[in-house]
Image (tube, rainbow, N blue to C red):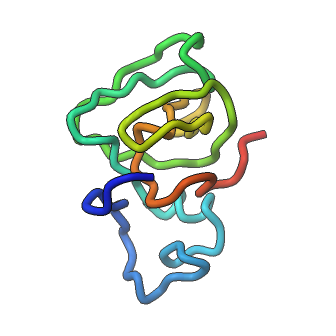
Amino acid sequence: MGVEEHTAEHTQDPADAVDGIEGATTAAEAAATGTRYPIAPGHRVNVRTGPGTNYRIVRTLPYGQKIPIYCQKPGEWVTGPYGTSNLWDNIANGQFVADAYVYTGRDGYIAPRCD
């Protein structure tokens, strides 16, 4: 979603790509191998316990942070630098950020749906 100059940081050679994910066959494996996605420049993003602004804030990501995305789930609609979306990215156990603030390179799911 959004601006081309903000790209995901990858730890493996793009020549090893399988299904568009460097060296991995699933988004979960990509996250496990170190694929990290940048937070929108100039934004400090709240990390919450669930997929919505009504969930408790557990921490705030600093400027320039890059995050793993282990799974995604629908939740509250949020408008951010990369559009309006109801997707929330799971970045750690019980920790979610609004996908509208994360440059993933595409609209929609880029990781498995969270259970």
Residue 109, above or below 45: below
Residue 75 higher or lower than 109, as above or below: above
For image coordinates 29% across by 57% down, the residue present is 6
Horizontal placement of 70 versus 35: left or right?
A: right
Q: How many marks?
A: 0
Task: Looking at the picture, tell me which residue is in the foreground, 76 or 64.
Answer: 76
Residue 94 percent across, percent down from the top left? 61, 27
Location of residue 57 in the rendering, given as x and y in whole percent from the top left corner: 47, 14
Q: Quadrant of residue 67?
A: top left
Return the residue found at the far bottom. Answer: 15
Q: Residue at x 37, y 82 (%)?
A: 13
Residue 105 on image: x %, y %: 44, 60
Left or right of 39? Residue 73 is right
Q: Give the position of the C terminus as an image quadrant.
A: top right
Q: Is residue 17 left or right of residue 10?
A: right
Q: Residue at x 39, y 76 (%)?
A: 12
Q: Residue at x 31, y 62 (%)?
A: 4
